[in-house]
Amino acid sequence: MPDLEERRKALSTGKLAETSWVRNTLSAFNDTLTARDHSRDFVYAHGHYLRSRVMAVALIFLILSPLWLMIDIIMLPQSVQRYTLAGRFVMMFGFAAVYWWARRSEENINRIRFSAGALFSLPALFYALVLYVLPSEANHALVGYGFIPFLLAAVLSVFPFTLLESFMAGLLLLALLAFAQLVNGSWLSPAGLEAQWLLATLLVVSLTANHFQLSLLLRLYRQATHDALTGLLNRGALERRLAEIEREESRTGKSAPYALLMLDIDHFKRVNDTHGHSVGDKVLREFARLIAQQVRTGDFVARFGGEEFVVVLQGASEEDATCVAERIRLAVENAALLNHDGKPVPVTTSIGVACSTGISVEESLGSEDALKIADERLYHAKEGGRNRVCYA
């Protein structure tokens, strides 16, 4: 009988592990399919990583492009050389422009994405030009341009694109190869089908590399920016987000008001001393969950350190922030937290409120000043008896 019970437990555990693996796999696939659910902070981190790759590949292409000029002179008919020479110089200028544009686009995600698109478009357009001006009887394999779609498919794996972005680029490369085959007469021939199959295989490999590369980036980002115990943002990620808000204000000249709540669990040391650190960790996790339930989707919550937490309410007035703070305070006060023996663990919180609102950027508070004011008001809330909200 005990053996049967153990087998049932083992089977149940195995099913749970399998379900968890399937859920995690589907979640990872969804994260790499599109950027729709990526956080704003990760979008910037991803953009910076993409920018470095764009600059490196653009520089490599810029250096290697002139080396093919001698091959053009030797292999191509003179009637074609003037077109390809002009096209190659335009392409080299384009690579230089992509490098310069990406270098100057550190804080502009749309420019970085445009640079990546231009980097792939330039060789593809040059290949289309060669196909258009090259005589039909010329040997494309000999002059060495037929490899361009395959080269671009391989280069695709270098970039942390989403699967949808890479898939669309792959369709364009397949269309480019089909156009080349129509020009040289190999469309639907055994050699043409073999080339299409090879390119499709390379694209599958590149998409797989994109998936694993982006998954790894997301995992590393979450480990670097999130608190392991509560799952909230850590202090470094909070400071980066506030800095991004200030940079956006400086760039646009428009104020982006937000309110700050600084929260502290009252007498948390007493909870640890009385019930143990494992119960203290449980209280921190539950406290973080209660805060997250009371804020909007666009707001963000961070563990500032120890038992201190910060909430950033974007676009909120001081009155709105005070209402949210009071809602959080009541939720924490009424929460049914139990220790390992099933006995209640009373928990309350004190909250300081600060607002950065200003008519202009000059009149708005900086993040450091707002945090300082919120911290001072948190101190006043504690001095006033704890379990209260202080906003003045």
Image (spheres, helix red, strand yellow):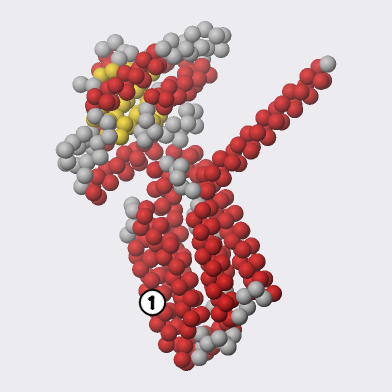
Q: Residue at x 35, y 41 (%)?
A: 240
Residue 373, image quadrant = top left
Query: In the picture provided, is 111 more to the left or to the right than 19?
Result: left
Q: Residue at x 36, y 20 (%)?
A: 328
Quarter containing the N terminus: top right
- Residue 215 lies, in percent from the top left, at 54, 46
- Name the residue at the top extreme: 343
Crowding near pointer 1: few (<14 within 10 Å), some, many (20+)?
A: some
Query: In the picture provided, is 16 more to the left or to the right than 221?
Result: right
Residue 290, image quadrant = top left
Quarter containing the C terminus: top left
Report the front residue among 138 and 101. Answer: 138
Q: Circle 1 — which element?
A: helix
Query: In the picture provided, is 62 more to the left or to the right than 388?
Result: right
**From where the camera sits, is residue 74 visible?**
yes
Q: Residue at x 46, y 91 (%)?
A: 79
- Residue 92 lies, in percent from the top left, at 40, 75
Residue 147, image quadrant = bottom right
Q: Residue at x 49, y 21 (%)?
A: 281
- Name the residue at the bottom extreme: 78
- Residue 90 lies, in percent from the top left, at 38, 77
Figure check: 217 above or below 22: below
- Residue 361 lies, in percent from the top left, at 19, 42
- The kind of residue tagged 1 is Val
Figure check: 374 above or below 176: above
Total numbered labels placed on residues in the image: 1
The residue to which callout 1 is attached is 90
Figure check: 92 above or below 208: below
**From where the camera sits, is residue 213 visible?**
no
Report the front residue among 149 and 221. Answer: 149
